[in-house]
Image (tube, grey):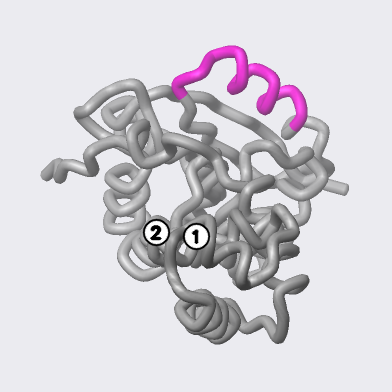
Amino acid sequence: MKKILKILLIEDSKSYAQGMQLLLAQHPLINTVQHVDNYKATLSLLKEEDIDIIILDLNFETNAFDGFIIAKKVKQLYPKIKIMILTQHTRQIHYNRLFNECNVDAYLDKQLGVEETYEAIGVIMQGGKYVDDNIKQMLEIEKWMQASKREQEVIVELIKGFTQKEIADVLCISPKTVEVHLRNLYDKFNVKNAPELVSKYIRYKNANRENVEESTAPFKSIE
């Protein structure tokens, strides 16, 4: 099988980039994997080289640029290049901006194995879009962030095994108010009962990553 694909990896962690280069080079269709670590180097290389796929992180250790800026600029200048986001940062607002504004082709969790990266490469080279299952789950459970503080307090007590009356006593509210909060939560998260609600809450707690928003770049514009 002929190796035909040229990959550009945009990543400011040298150790991670070196590991990814070695793994990507094993793909049967990948010919070359080049690496840059910033906005200017990306645009400079693209003027000289024909690239098929860019693999891009979102967050960089600078306020001057981020993955959104790079992706949007690349798509403006080179719309045929496929862009795959490989990152630890997962938010619904990120998803919307990446696909609607930046027109990226794939969104993957950086913690996944290389096999799923290979799968995404196959999908996007055939003209499809790819979002891995981890990202999909993270986007779903982000709905928990929309729950009110009181609703979250009710869930925390519920997971301890407390009854509605016991939850009411702990939170100093009436059992009827607890019932209303639970009914709202069932509707909001599309569950039928307390065990389903607790199950979803546990998945949220296990998958949620703390302080993502604080570490995300400020998304400034660059002309």
Above or below: residue 95 compared with residue 214: below
* Magenta stretch: includes residue 21: yes
The magenta segment: 12-23
Q: As drawn, is 219 to the left or to the right of 100? A: left
SS class, disc 1: helix
Secondary structure mostly seen in magenta is helix
Q: Residue furthest top?
A: 15
Q: Could you say which is closer to the camera, residue 59 or residue 175?
A: 175
Mark yes or no: residue 79 visible: no
Whether the residues at callouts 2 and 1 have beta carbons within 8 Å, the answer is yes
State the image quarter where residue 38 is shown: top left
Foreground of the two, 209 or 12: 209
Question: Label 2, on which residue?
Answer: 149
Q: Residue at x 46, y 74 (%)?
A: 174
- The image shows residue 203 at horizontal and vertical percentages of 70, 55
Locate residue 82, reporting x and y percent: 51, 56
Tell me the residue at 40%/56% (across/down): 94
Residue situated furthest right in the rendering? 1
| Residue type at numbered disc 2 | Lys
Q: Give the class, few, some or many, for how many residues have Cα within 10 Å of label 1's Cα (few <14, many ≥20).
A: some
Left or right: residue 65 compared with residue 223: right
Q: Residues within 10 Å of mark 2 (few under 14, many from 20)?
A: few
Of helix, strand and loop, which one carries label 2?
helix
Name the residue type under label 1: Gln
Residue 25 visible in image: yes
Quadrant containing the C terminus is top left
Separation of marks 2 and 1 at Cα, in angstroms? 5 Å
Above or below, 111 relative to 175? above
Residue at x 70%, y 36% (from the top left corner): 31
Can you identify the residue that label 1 sits on? 152
Residue at screen point 54% across, 50% down? 84
